[in-house]
Image (tube, rainbow, N blue to C red):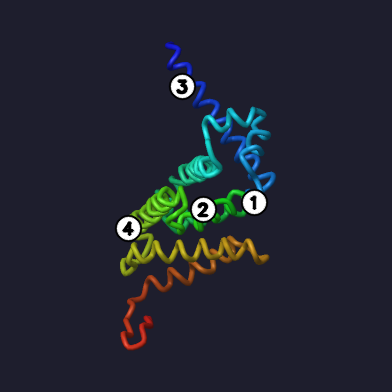
């Protein structure tokens, strides 16, 4: 093994250790008020070593979200493949209940992504577009497999599922209710609506069944 290969492996190992520490820190302390020095303390290494890999706060947050959310989405891929988009999002929502601190961090990135001047805005927007695209494709497969009604437009269905699941998750941070039960109720009504044709009312912009 060359020295260069060994150095690269050591660098990857240290980055992994730092992000593991960041995830543990966010779960223990929440993200508000945390700084790079807190990550270094959690990792048990000097701040300078953290800054070699992550020179600023935003780079740590991006790497943390990328790892944590990417890992859980990958783990739930089979749910989407076997049971559909609605079941996939239900499993995601159930996971949100079990990991509230990281979900609060994820929600904070929505605000960052909506701000064009934020250094990570483009990354967050790209990731969200990929997530929307994944749900849309899942719904397309659901229609083809007969899991969802043929009348449902997957593009609109993905919008509605995201709005509903994320809206309920946000509400659950501010109100005390059973998030998974609320998701089940909402998707039951949503899927009922997907079975009916929509008729536009152009004079007032309202759509009715």
Question: Is 48 left, or right, of 5 in this rendering?
Answer: right
Quarter assignment of residue 35: top right
* Mark pair 4, 2: CA separation: 28 Å
Q: Residue at x 63, y 44 (%)?
A: 26
Disc 4 marks which residue?
140
- Secondary element at tag 1: loop
Image quarter of the C terminus: bottom left
* Residue 98 appears in view: no
Looking at marks 4 and 2 on the same chain, the residue that comes earlier in the sequence is marked by: 2
Q: Can you give x and y, in whole percent of width and height, for residue 3 in the image?
A: 45, 12
- Label 4: element kind: helix
* Residue at the spot 47% in from the left edge and 52% down from the top edge: 118
Q: Nearer the viewer, mark 1 or mark 4?
A: 1
Mark sitting earlier along the chain (2/3): 3
Could you say whether the residue bearing mark 3 is in a helix, strand or loop? helix
Residue under label 2: 109
Badges 2 and 3: C-beta atoms under 8 Å apart? Answer: no
Q: Residues within 10 Å of mark 2 (few under 14, many from 20)?
A: many
């Amino acid at each position: 093994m060359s020295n260069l290969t060994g150095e690269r492996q050591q660098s990857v190992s240290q980055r992994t250790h730092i992000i593991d520490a960041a995830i543990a820190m966010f779960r223990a302390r929440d993200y508000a008020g945390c700084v790079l020095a807190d990550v270094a303390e959690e990792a048990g290494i000097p701040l300078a070593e953290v800054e070699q890999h992550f020179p600023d706060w935003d780079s740590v947050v991006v790497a943390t979200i990328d790892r944590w959310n990417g890992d859980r989405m990958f783990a739930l891929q089979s749910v989407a493949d076997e049971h559909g988009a609605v079941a996939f999002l239900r499993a995601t929502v159930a996971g949100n209940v079990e990991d509230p601190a990281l979900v609060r961090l994820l929600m904070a990135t929505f605000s960052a992504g909506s701000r064009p001047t934020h250094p990570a805005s483009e990354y967050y927007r790209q990731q969200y577009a990929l997530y929307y695209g994944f749900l849309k494709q899942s719904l397309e497969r659901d229609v083809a497999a007969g899991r969802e009604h043929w009348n449902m437009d997957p593009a609109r269905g993905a919008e509605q599922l995201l709005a509903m699941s994320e809206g309920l998750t946000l509400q659950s941070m501010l109100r005390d209710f059973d998030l998974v039960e609320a998701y089940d109720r909402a998707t039951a009504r949503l899927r009922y609506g997907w079975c009916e044709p929509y008729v536009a009312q152009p004079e007032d912009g309202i759509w009715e069944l």
